């Protein structure tokens, strides 16, 4: 297949599935427990290659939409897949070591200190709102770029987001953490309540992978989107600053993550954005126009 047909994020998607499959073959015992993950990876690789080979990027078309945005559809599948890999290397979660490390540095366990000193229904609701913004953020951002015709920025954005996810997801089983809400479940004094967004977040969390806490992909990917908006759409980026800051606070205030998860997620997001913008070349898709049947239309090449 012609290498010119591939975008940077295509290589990342295929490379991630290959390396993940290799890790399963090397460490998955008994291997029969991981056949579903291996079969899923084979199906996805074949599907991606079909998309790359046969979908012609012409605008407007469903083909262009799928060719550019298919990784955003796969992210949910990749995330769900990590649930079956949490115990690939370790049989137990490592929360005890992480909680002890944070206490040795900070003098307290932040989640327990917040529980004892800082729980408020309206703070809970505001931070639940900012935390919840992550769920639609990727899709709103990418759809905005698509309908603006910013195909080059979609390539840049998806490359940085793929890097963030594909570095983060293997860390779920390299350093499995179930999170404060499980580890400190019997130690909390107060419950977190809110009239609308707290229940909404709790509903969304029912689909969360048990053990997928280190690092916080919520914060890492949200940081990528905020930085790219600040670079290319400054007003939108400025609006995102308090939202992403609130999201970061909401991760450990809401008992879903440790402070360390958020810091590591932020470092990965920053590094992925830096590498994408500075070192990865993007050729091919740009906004252009041609005449077809006497009418001027947009297209991508």
Image (tube, rainbow, N blue to C red):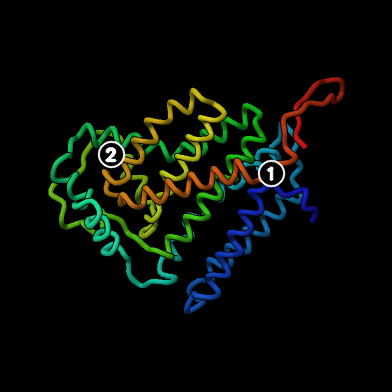
From the viewer's side, name the closer residue of 270 and 229.
270
**Label 2: few (<14), some or many (≥20) within 10 Å?**
many
Which one is closest to the eye, mark 1 or mark 2? 1
Give the left or right position of residue 60, taking residue 172 as reference.
right
Give the left or right position of residue 163, taking residue 150 as reference.
left
Q: Residue at x 21, y 57 (%)?
A: 184
Q: Position of residue 117 (x, y in %)?
A: 14, 41
Q: Position of residue 219 (x, y in %)?
A: 41, 43
SS state under label 1: loop
Q: Disc 1 and disc 2: Cα gap in Å?
A: 42 Å
**Label 1: few (<14), some or many (≥20) within 10 Å?**
few
Q: Quadrant of the N terminus?
A: bottom right
Q: Is residue 36 above or below residue 197?
A: below
Tell which circle, 1 or 2, labels the residue nearer the N-terminal end. Answer: 2
Q: Residue at x 54, y 26 (%)?
A: 233
Q: Position of residue 165 (x, y in %)?
A: 50, 51
Q: Quadrant of the C terminus?
A: top right
SS state under label 2: helix
As drawn, which residue projects farthest toward the right? 293
Residue 215: assigned label? none
Instruction: State how many labels appear.
Output: 2
Residue 281: assigned label? 1
Residue 16 occupies quadrant: bottom right
Circles 1 and 2: CB atoms closer than 8 Å? no
From the viewer's side, name the closer residue of 161 and 144.
161
Residue 44 occupies quadrant: bottom right
Give the left or right position of residue 44, taking residue 201 as reference.
right
Q: Residue at x 26, y 43 (%)?
A: 253
**Which residue is labeled 2 in the image?**
198
Residue 57 occupies quadrant: top right
From the viewer's side, name the closer residue of 207 and 185.
185
């Amino acid at each position: 297949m012609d290498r010119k047909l591939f975008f940077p994020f295509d290589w990342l998607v295929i490379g991630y599935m290959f390396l993940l499959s290799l890790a399963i073959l090397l460490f998955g015992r008994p291997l029969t427990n991981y056949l579903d993950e291996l079969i899923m990876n084979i199906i996805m690789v074949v599907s991606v290659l079909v998309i790359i080979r046969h979908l012609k990027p012409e605008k407007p078309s469903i083909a262009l939409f799928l060719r550019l945005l298919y990784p955003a559809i796969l992210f949910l599948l990749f995330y769900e897949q990590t649930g079956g890999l949490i115990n690939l290397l370790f049989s137990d979660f490592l929360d005890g070591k992480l909680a002890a490390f944070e206490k040795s540095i900070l003098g307290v366990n932040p989640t327990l200190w917040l529980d004892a000193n800082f729980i408020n229904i309206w703070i809970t609701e505001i931070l639940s709102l900012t935390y919840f913004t992550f769920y639609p953020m990727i899709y709103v951002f990418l759809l905005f770029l698509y309908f603006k015709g910013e195909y080059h920025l979609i390539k840049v954005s998806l490359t940085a987001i793929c890097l963030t996810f594909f570095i983060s997801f293997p860390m779920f089983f390299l350093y499995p953490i179930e999170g404060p809400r499980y580890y400190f479940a019997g130690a909390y004094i107060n419950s977190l309540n809110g009239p609308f967004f707290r229940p909404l977040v709790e509903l969304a969390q029912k689909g969360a992978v048990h053990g997928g806490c280190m690092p916080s992909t919520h914060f890492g990917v949200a940081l990528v989107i905020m930085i790219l908006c600040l670079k290319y759409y400054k007003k939108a980026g400025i609006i995102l600053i308090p939202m992403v800051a609130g999201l970061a606070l909401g991760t450990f205030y809401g008992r879903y993550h440790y402070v360390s998860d958020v810091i590591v997620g932020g470092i990965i997001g920053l590094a992925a954005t830096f590498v994408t913008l500075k070192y990865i070349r993007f050729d091919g898709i740009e906004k252009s126009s041609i005449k077809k049947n006497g009418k001027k239309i947009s297209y991508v090449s």
